[in-house]
Amino acid sequence: MLRAIPRRSIVPLSRSLLTNCTRSTILSPLTVRSISSNIAPPPASSNLSGGHHYPKPKNLAEILKGVIQSTGPIPVASYMRQCLTNPDYGYYTTRNPLDLKTGDFVTSPEISSTFGEACALWYFSVFLTQLKQNAIQDPKKFKVQDKTFRFIEFGPGKGTLMYDIISTLNRFIKNNNPVEIFMIEKSDVLIREQYELLCNPAKTKAELVRVDEANFKSVTQWGHPIKWSKDDDFKIGVSEHYMNFVMAHEFFDALPVNQFRKTEKGWREYLVDLKSNVSKDILLPNVSHTTIPRTNNDKPEFKLIESPYQTLSSALPKAIPRYDSLDIGSRIEICPESHKFISQISQIISSAPVGAGLIIDYGTTTIPINTLRGIKNHKFVDPLTEPGEVDLSIDVDFSDLSMLLEDERFATWIADQGDFLNSMGLGYRTDQLVASCEEHNDEERKQKVIDAYKRLTGKNVRDMGKVYKVLGFVPDKYKSLQIPGFDNGSQKNESKAAKKQDEDEVAKPKPRVPYY
């Protein structure tokens, strides 16, 4: 059972230890956050087959059933997009997936605010190194006092990570430079959560102003302007007066993927089909979909099938040598939308003289094979069950993201989350918190601090330190600088308190087991 502990119950910089399911692969084999919807549901009264009139769909499964019966099986990416961001029935658009009582998963920022503190220190450290280079190379043109810090987050969840980043940075920036925040968020529910946390309207009386259908604005509790956009093709002003810092935490794992298998006849795409009374024959040329028998199942069930012919998307792996050089039988996932978002991120950072970004997610540096998973009630479930009621996610292809950024003239670094956090001083910070707990004789709080640290940095199967990766990137002109967090020296920075506890546990005498 997931323990629900108040967010600030440990110390100001530590959150509850949540020991069950994160959205990673640690148990088995989108907040999108920003994905467009491209399957049009059949209207309440449509004439798709022989004059038959359909009642208004009761749920997303009914919509998908109607689409598949009318047009044939759909790509995995289309299925994911509808499940996550359908305006009426999507997982992210109709609930708060991070709610302590009803949410289906937990993320690093909710485990401990030291996570956000470490990220804030990374941004500020990178800012200082870039500031120094600009001051040396062009002191007359670059004037830091004229610049505005702008923090852009893709898929900001409850707003917890941005809260911790800004809270930390305010101590360093103080009133030296203005700060602005820009959030890319698809869900009205989560925009409201973020507004409540970051703007604290009960105290500040700040209003959430709707600019238009896709955009909102307000003022944070610290006095910083904040904007939200629900639009994939969001509009953000670019100017040399900004210093842009981007965060995408558990964002790319929720973007739709296309799945393929390499056959002797070429690449074949996996499609989502109905389980009952629907044949593969609907993929054959010149077959009228309106003649396919319809199912009467109240709860449509879905399955994956392999297209016997090339689809439009089959050209994707064929065009990329990294995929097309694989052996016959290889199965892969490709995320086309990641290309669009990397392009947007690159343009934002490149538009100003100072900037950097972090992408933090679970994934791999190898090509993902078959990683689509469903999560419900902190357990992994079949991703094709209960569309819109189950969170869907995939492993992020960090090598692909890195190559895309390098194509945009960025220098990149990849590290395990545990190594990155330790390099940024999380071990030292944990020991400070432990010392404070010991000073107040609070053993319970001390253990929560240590447990949270182990969860974030540990390399065991249920920990997040190895399966989660951190991708840091800066414009190419800064590639020769010493970028913190990726120095491979994290071991020496581990928490001494956590390490001692592990050593004491190993040293405990084990009960003798009688031999028979």
Image (tube, rainbow, N blue to C red):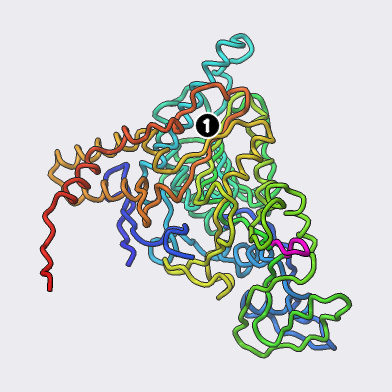
User: Residue 438 at x, y = what percent?
Assistant: 15, 41
- Say which quarter of the image contains residue 136: top right
Task: Give the residue drawn at x 72%, y 79%.
Answer: 66
Question: Does 89 appear above or below 232?
Answer: below
Dominant secondary structure (helix, strand or loop) of the stretch shown in magenta: strand
Residue 232, position as x, y percentages in the image: 68, 50
Q: Quadrant of the N terminus?
A: bottom left
Q: Which residue is mark 1?
A: 179
Badge 1: how crowded within 10 Å, few (<14), some, or many (20+)? many
Q: Can you name the residue that lies furthest to the right here?
A: 286
Report the label total.
1
Q: Nearer the viewer, residue 504 or 64?
A: 504
Looking at the rendered image, the quarter that the C terminus falls into is bottom left
In the figure, is residue 379 to the left or right of 280?
left
Q: Residue at x 45, y 43 (%)?
A: 416
502 versus 169 height, above or below: below
Position of 455 with respect to 98 (left or right) is: left
User: Residue 267 lies in magenta, yes or no?
Assistant: yes
| Badge 1 amino acid | Val
Segment colored magenta = 262-268
Q: Position of residue 365 (x, y in %)?
A: 55, 46
Q: Position of residue 342 (x, y in %)?
A: 65, 42
Q: Is residue 118 left or right of residue 184?
A: left
Is residue 345 covered in magenta?
no
Left or right: 445 as drawn, with respect to 44: left
The answer to which of 234 and 479 lies nearer the viewer is: 479
Work out whether 196 lies above or below 268. above
Looking at the image, which residue sits at the far front?
516
Q: Nearer the viewer, residue 99 or 292?
A: 292
Element type at mark 1: strand
